[in-house]
Image: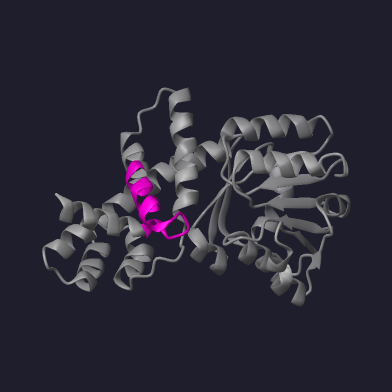
């Protein structure tokens, strides 16, 4: 395979790009804050001077940015510099309609586009065990599968353009419910004077168990409010869930409630703490009753 570009070296993107490098892929990177690329450059990655320079050199380009408008901005800067037959893979969580529109626009230039949002948190990115929901043309997705295998335990085609994002929004709805269940249960147990380590161990190993219990339970026990997955990113995703639900006449009252509670947490602690800090909000709500 030719060169692969990676754009967006945040909490998720940095370790993902690192796995590509470790697996022998010829890697070119770019980030708005160039200093974040230093660790990868020291290991042999090439730092592009700008997005156009990266696009001109790469067969495949992976994005891991934030919002729909961020993806549009990056793709717009690259589109006239990408070679026909190249493929853009977007690991960001964006609106499904945005993914569909970008796919159509790039297809006119014979450039492939795959909406491939990820789940598994920073822990999954660091371990190379992410799950990836791939939406797009099957032949295009098959071409980039060897890249995805560098940092995914499971990457599957879920449908045509935009379906990766629909699947990710369904995932975020489930994530929100599991987060609420964990934090509400732990706050209740704390008020009841139970041993929280025992709560995590016994509930997490039984019918109440979940990814949230296994991964965020220890963070609550250790009062570790570092991401994880930051509240501002979770609330961005919930915003997309709420917009998408209105479009298809779906009811997601639980997600709306968790978003409102995370808004209180964000106002108190800022948007860069872990979503598991919802536990603190629920404890305070109990004290304020």
Span shown in magenta: 260-276
Q: Is residue 161 visible?
A: no
Locate residue 285 relative to residue 59 in the image: left or right.
left
175 sits left or right of 254 in the view: right
On the image, the x and y values in percent for residue 186 come to: 23, 61
Q: How many marks?
A: 0
Q: Position of residue 61 (x, y in %)?
A: 75, 51
Q: Quadrant of residue 85?
A: top right
Specify whether 130 is left or right of 241: right
Q: Position of residue 136 (x, y in %)?
A: 66, 37
Compared to residue 37, the image places residue 144 above or below, namely above
108 shown above or below 120: above
Split into 4 quadrants, where in the image is the N terminus?
bottom right
The residue under the point 16% across, 56% down is 287
| Whether residue 198 is situated above or below residue 251 in the rendered picture | below
Residue 88, quarter of picture: top right
């Amino acid at each position: 395979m030719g060169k692969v570009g990676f754009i967006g070296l945040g909490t998720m993107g940095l370790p993902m790009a690192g796995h590509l490098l470790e697996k022998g892929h010829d890697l070119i990177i770019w980030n708005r804050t160039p200093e974040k690329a230093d660790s990868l450059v020291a290991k042999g990655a090439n730092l592009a001077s700008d997005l156009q320079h990266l696009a001109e050199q790469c067969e495949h380009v992976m994005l891991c940015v934030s919002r729909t408008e961020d993806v549009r901005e990056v793709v717009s800067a690259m589109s006239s510099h990408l070679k026909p037959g190249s493929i853009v893979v977007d690991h960001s969580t964006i609106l499904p309609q945005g993914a569909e529109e970008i796919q159509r626009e790039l297809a006119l230039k014979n450039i492939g586009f795959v909406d491939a949002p990820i789940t598994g948190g920073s822990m999954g990115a660091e371990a190379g065990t992410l799950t990836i929901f791939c939406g797009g043309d099957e032949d295009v997705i098959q071409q980039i599968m060897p890249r995805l295998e560098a940092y995914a335990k499971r990457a599957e085609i879920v449908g045509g353009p935009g379906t990766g994002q629909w699947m990710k929004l369904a995932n975020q709805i489930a994530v929100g419910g599991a987060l609420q269940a964990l934090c509400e249960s732990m706050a209740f147990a704390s008020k009841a004077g139970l041993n929280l380590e025992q709560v995590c161990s016994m509930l997490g190993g039984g019918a109440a168990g979940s990814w949230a219990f296994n991964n965020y339970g220890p963070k609550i026990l250790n009062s570790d409010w570092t991401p994880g997955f930051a509240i501002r990113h979770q609330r961005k995703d919930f915003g997309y869930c709420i917009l998408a639900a209105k479009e298809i006449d779906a009811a997601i009252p639980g997600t709306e409630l968790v978003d409102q509670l995370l808004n209180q947490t964000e106002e108190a602690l800022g948007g860069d703490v872990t979503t598991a800090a919802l536990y603190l909000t629920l404890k305070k709500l109990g004290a304020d009753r």
